[in-house]
Image (cartoon, rainbow, N blue to C red):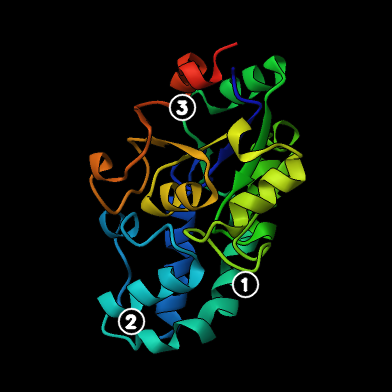
């Protein structure tokens, strides 16, 4: 039977947010008198929450990674007001989400990005009306790869783990889905830290609209 819900990661899956994240990160690094991170480096730093992002940047620029937790509030102060300045949906995302809605599929965003910034991005890009539930990195007690965010999204959507699929671009998306007993589809664009074939997803897709043809989601 076709599934009832799609749980989507945000950064690297629905939207390309690398430049806005990089701008805020470089603002923070400048305050610390550390060199900026280049566009070729930022994608390898995104995906495991703000703390890990800052930790990776500090390690790469000769700072003290142990200071990362204390710098999270300052990063968010720099990032959240500008979270959607350069961020854009990947090709076909809005159209695919609208098609999901027309089919009666319920959609949640499950991301390690803080919930406030997630809501700002979705609203700014006119995607908010297409998403029923948002679980950010500070919504549940744990972040992906822990299953808690996925399980919370299922609870709020009022669907079972057998009725849903998780779609993401990185290892933590697949790991969280597996731990929650949910099927996983991985996109081959985005910010994966490991080769896509090693993610362990049930299916790989090269573009977001390919979901419309996936057997799991076929009407």
Residue hosting label 1:
77
Give the number of the disc on residue 208. 3
Disc 1: CA contacts within 10 A as few (<14), some (14-19) or many (>=20): few
Inter-mark Cα distance, 2 to 3: 37 Å
Q: Percent from the top left, x then y, of residue 197?
A: 24, 39
Is 119 or 28 nearer to us in this picture? Answer: 119
Labels 2 and 1: the sequence-earlier one: 2
Q: Residue at x 34, y 73 (%)?
A: 57
Query: How far is mark 2 from mark 1, CA to CA?
Result: 19 Å
Which residue is at 60% across, 59% downward?
148
Return the residue nearer the eye: 122 or 96.
Answer: 96
Task: Tell which circle, 1 or 3, labels the residue nearer the N-terminal end.
Answer: 1
* Residue located beneath label 2 in the image: 34
Picture quadrant where residue 44 is located:
bottom left
Q: Nearer the viewer, residue 112 or 104?
A: 104
- The secondary structure type at the circle numbered 1 is helix
Q: Residues within 10 Å of mark 3 (few under 14, many from 20)?
A: many
Please, what secondary structure does the residue beneath circle 3 have?
helix
* 180 lies above or below 28: above
Please give the name of the residue rendered at 68% of the width and 15% of the height, measured from the top-left corner: 103
Give the mark, 2 or 3, whose residue is nearer the N terminus. 2
């Amino acid at each position: 039977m076709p599934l009832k819900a799609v749980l989507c990661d945000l950064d690297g899956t629905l939207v390309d947010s690398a430049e806005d994240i990089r701008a805020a990160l470089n603002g923070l690094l400048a305050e610390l008198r550390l060199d900026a991170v280049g566009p070729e480096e930022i994608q390898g730093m995104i995906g495991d929450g703000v703390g890990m992002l800052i930790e990776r940047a500090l390690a790469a620029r000769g700072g003290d990674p142990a200071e990362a937790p204390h710098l999270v509030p300052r990063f968010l102060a720099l990032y959240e007001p500008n979270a959607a300045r350069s961020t854009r949906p990947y090709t076909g995302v809005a159209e695919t989400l609208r098609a999901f809605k027309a089919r009666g599929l319920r959609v949640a965003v499950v991301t390690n990005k803080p919930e406030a910034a997630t809501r700002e991005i979705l609203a700014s890009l006119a995607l908010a009306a297409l998403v029923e539930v948002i679980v950010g990195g500070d919504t549940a007690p744990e972040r992906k790869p822990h299953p808690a965010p996925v399980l919370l999204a299922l609870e709020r959507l009022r669907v079972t783990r057998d009725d849903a699929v998780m779609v993401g671009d990185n290892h933590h998306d697949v790991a969280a889905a597996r731990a929650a007993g949910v099927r996983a589809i991985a996109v081959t664009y985005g910010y994966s830290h490991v080769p896509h074939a090693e993610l362990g997803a049930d299916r790989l897709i090269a573009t977001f609209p390919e979901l419309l043809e996936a057997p799991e989601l076929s009407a």
